[in-house]
Image (tube, rainbow, N blue to C red):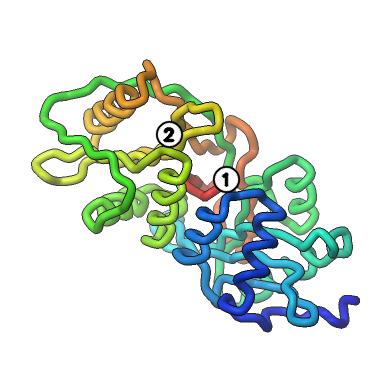
Amino acid sequence: MLQKLLYNTISLDRARPFLRNLWHEAFGDCEAFIDTFLDLCASDEVLHTLSMNGRVVSALYALPYTINCNNTVKRVAYIYAVATDSEFRQKGLMRLLMSQVHDSLQQEGYAAAFLLPSSLSLANYYASMGYRVCACRKRVMLAGVECAGYIYEKCDTLDNAACTFISNCFAQRRNFVIHPQWSLRMNVSSCVLSGGALFLAKKDEEVVAAAFVVIEDDGTPLLLDILYCDETAKSSLVAYISKCYSVAALQALVCDKSEGAPFAMALPLDDSFPDYVGMQLMLDK
C-alpha cells in the first residue's frame, strides 16, 4: 500500500473538501473554526499530505513562526492538526509524513519543529520521533484593580494598531514564539467563536494592554495571554475583564519552564535551539 502513496501532490484548493472532512472526523471542531483556519492560515506552502488515488489520507500543517532566541531570530514550525483518515490508521502513515516534513524543514533552515500533544500516549508517540518537552503550562488566578484614565474595548476583530502593539510585545519576550499577523487574527477569531473576545486597554488613544479571552464549555472565561506596557495597564485590564464576566478573578494560562503539565514538545533541527520556549496562543483547541 505504501508504494501507492504520494507526498504533497494535491493543492490546498483541490484538497479542501478532504481536509475539512478529515479535520472534523479527527478533532470534532465546528465548521466555522475549520473554515476560518483554512482561509487565514493554510496555503500550499504549509500543507503537507499523503494521498492515494487523489484522496488525502493523512495531513498536517507546518505553520511558520519565529522565536527571539537570545536576541537571534530563529525560524520554527508549528506542526498542527495532525490527522490520518480512520480507514488508514495504525499503518505508519503519520510517521512517514512527519519524517518527510522534518526533512523538508531542515533543508529550508528551520531551527526546530514543535507541537502540542493532546494526551500522554501522543506525547510518548512523538517522543519516539525525537521530540522533547520544551514548555509546561499551568492555570493561575489573576486579580486586578481598575484604574482611571484607561479606555476599554471588547473586540471581535484585530485592527492594525492592536496588531502592531501585540507584535511588538511578543518580539520583546526572549525565547518566546512570535506570532505573525495571520496567527494573531486566527486567535482573535478562535476567541470570538468560543464566545470570548480580544480586550484592549487604551490610554491617550494608544493601545497599552491586550488580552485574549476564550469561554470554556462550562462558561468559565479563560485568559489565554495578556500583553501590556506596564503592570498598571495589565491590572486595570484584568479588573475590567473580570467585571465583564462577573468574576472576582480570572483564570489564566501561564507558560512555564518547569512547573505545570507538559504542554509543548520540540524536535530541534539545529544545535542552537533552546531547551525551553515560551508558547502562548498556540490554537490548542
Measuring from the top left, give residue 121's x and y in whole percent.
Answer: 79, 44
Q: Residue furthest left?
A: 204
Measuring from the top left, give residue 75's x and y in whole percent.
Answer: 49, 65
Residue at the (24%, 35%) spot, across then down: 230
Which is nearer the eye, 20 or 167?
A: 20
Labels 2 and 1: the sequence-earlier one: 2
Which is nearer the eye, 111 or 30?
A: 30
Identify whether 138 is placed above or below 56.
above
Identify whether 181 is placed above or below 14.
above
Measuring from the top left, give residue 235's x and y in whole percent.
Answer: 28, 26
Residue at the (17%, 40%) spot, across then down: 202
Please tell me how many numbered marks the rendered image carries.
2
Q: Secondary structure at mark 2?
A: strand
Q: Could one spot residue 68 in this view of the protein?
A: no
Q: Is residue 122 left or right of residue 256?
A: right
* Residue 285: mark in rendering: 1
Task: Name which quarter of the figure residue 196 lies in.
Answer: top left
Residue at the (20%, 45%) spot, across then down: 207
Q: Give the amino acid at mark 1.
A: Lys
Residue where numbered disc 2 is placed: 223
* Residue 52: mark in rendering: none
Q: Could one spot residue 190 in this view of the protein?
A: yes
Q: Give the amino acid at mark 2.
A: Leu
Task: Name which quarter of the figure residue 90 lies in.
Answer: bottom right
Using the numbered discs, state the Cα–Cα distance from disc 2 to disc 1 in whole angstroms. 14 Å
Q: Residue furthest top?
A: 248
Task: Name which quarter of the figure residue 214 lies in.
Answer: top left
